[in-house]
Image (tube, rainbow, N blue to C red):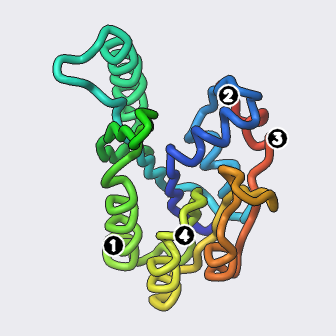
Amino acid sequence: MEDTLVFIDEGFLSKLSKYFGNGAYIKIDYLKLAKNLAKKQNLSCKHLFYYTAPPFQGTPPADDEKTRKEGYDKFIIALSKNKEITVREGRCQKIINNIGQVDYKQKGVDALMVSDMVSVPIRYPKIKKIILVTSDTDFCPIIEDIEGLGVRVFLYTYYEKKRNSKFSVSHHLIDCCENVFYLTKQNFDDNKK
């Protein structure tokens, strides 16, 4: 079987997990998911790149922020021990809008993914196919660039045709990639921890 690399956007996968879990996150084995997605394409997962951001920490951190960070750190340490996985971390930004609502956004994660994806032809010259798990249209230029360099991208995403849904993906992402596959709840159920 031909080797592949799998790139997982944890922010997207986390939202989808909570959606499929009806408000509760479905805990999955990310390496198992990566290997199963590769297998569906008759590929062998050589390495998983997992992109995330630690939970926001105030100055000083609130008790619930400390607790979330402790759980996150334990998870990341355990994940990082596996030599088949590279964990790349951005940061988390707290945003308060003009009516006082708080939202949290990952920052720098996409840049890390783009950097790693664009280096595939250099660092992994034998890899001719990669798997990308995301719903972010920001990846269209890199998908087009690396496909122009001879690396095929298999996109795994999810979208709904409902306007203003958190999963209403622009067709630009779907159109820029010729190999598009849709994640289902079954993908989560099959790869539970």
Circle 1: element type: loop
- Please tell me whether mark 4 or mark 3 is closer to you in this view: 4
Residue 98 image offset from top left, x and y in percent: 39, 42
| Dot 4 and dot 2 residues touching (CB under 8 Å) | no
C-alpha separation, residue under disc 4 versus residue under disc 2: 25 Å
Q: Is residue 83 visible?
A: no
Disc 1 marks which amino acid? Ser
Disc 2 marks which amino acid? Ile
Disc 3 marks which amino acid? Gln
The answer to which of marks 1 and 3 sits earlier in the sequence is: 1
The answer to which of marks 4 and 1 sits earlier in the sequence is: 1
Circle 2: element type: loop
Q: In this view, does 27 lie above or below 96?
A: above
Task: Please tell me which residue is depicted at 64% across the width and 66% down the height of the picture.
Answer: 155
| Label 2 sits on residue | 26
* Nearer to me, 114 or 60: 60
| Label 4 sits on residue | 137
| Label 3 sits on residue | 186
Please count the marks in the image: 4
Whether residue 16 sits left or right of residue 152 in the image: it is right
Q: Is residue 14 visible?
A: yes
| Label 1 sits on residue | 119
Q: Which residue lies furthest to the front in this view?
A: 99
Mark drawn on residue 132:
none
